Amino acid sequence: IVASQMGDARSAEQYFVRAVNGSPERIDFQLNLGRLYLQQGLAEDALHRFQAALQLKSSDLTAALGMGQCLLQLGDRQQAYDVFMQAKEKHPNNHVVYMALFRSSFQLNKVDEAKRYLDDVLKSEPKHAEAHLGLGQIALQQGDFEEAEKQTLQAIAINPDLSLSYPILSGIKTFTANDKELIDRIVAQRQKVLPESAANVDLSFVLGKIMDDLGDYESAFEYIKQANEVRHTHNQYHADAELAHLQAMIDHTTPETLAVSSSNNSETPIFIVGM
């Protein structure tokens, strides 16, 4: 666990595998290894561990949520949704389950249902950062950029450590010199994370985009260069996960979404060549 927290995934895996092999009946060992694999993007390996944990204890919430998250990463959104619904039956009114149901519903384009889960969470916990971020994601899909920015900024104000907020915000907002306080907050957030972490990669790309918005192209290039260097050390290609990601992009980019997110009404084909 210490090795994992220090970012030494290789040593952490070795220790966790020894623990599982030595005591396969220990559900906590199965869960530790499953979480590590999930953090590394090894969804198939993680799925086997969470399934083993559920065989040991069918009502374990952590195992069910982990299994559902693996299925989402592998592109099996309907099965993930079914797993989360079963968890809801066993753990009603659980906010973590509701957020998992939001994510799976949203990916299945059940937007109204997804929003209901967020509304239910916010009724009892108005300062739930992830729920506000979820509302921002729904608003973004519907082309309401003002609401998307508002909800994302609210999520950041509640929990600055919610790293997913920053890439979403940078995709919505064009930064100017008037955003100095927010930019300083993002710089400070990057300084808090481990240099080799995925959060550092995300925040470096965000700052690269911000510097580009501000016209500081030298700093933008440096941030992007640093992000790519760290990302390269974590680069593990998984065809199933990549295909699932591409399918999610295809499903998200509907004619309705494009109609509200673009002012270009021309039907002339556009060919994009190169990068």
Image (cartoon, rainbow, N blue to C red):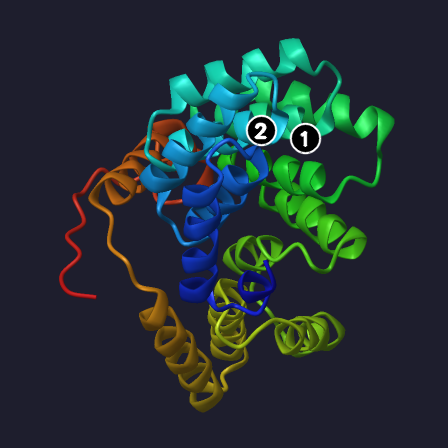
Q: Which residue is mark 1?
A: 96
Q: Give coordinates of residue 264: x percent, y percent.
A: 35, 44
**Image side of residue 164 versus residue 75, left or right:** right
Q: Which residue is mark 2?
A: 100
Q: Residues within 10 Å of mark 1 (few under 14, many from 20)?
A: some
Q: Quadrant of the C terminus?
A: bottom left
Vertical placement of residue 180 versus 65, above or below: below
**Image side of residue 151 versus residue 114, left or right:** right
Vertical placement of residue 23 versus 237, above or below: above
Vertical placement of residue 56 versus 195, above or below: above
Nearest to the observer: residue 5 or residue 212:
5
Q: Residue furthest top?
A: 89
Q: Amino acid at mark 1?
A: Val
Nearest to the observer: residue 19 or residue 45:
19
Image quadrant in which you'd find residue 87: top right
Q: Give coordinates of residue 19: x percent, y percent.
A: 48, 48
Proximity of marks 1 and 2: CB atoms separated by less than 8 Å:
yes
Q: In the drawing, what numbered circle is on residue 181?
A: none
Nearest to the observer: residue 119 or residue 125:
125
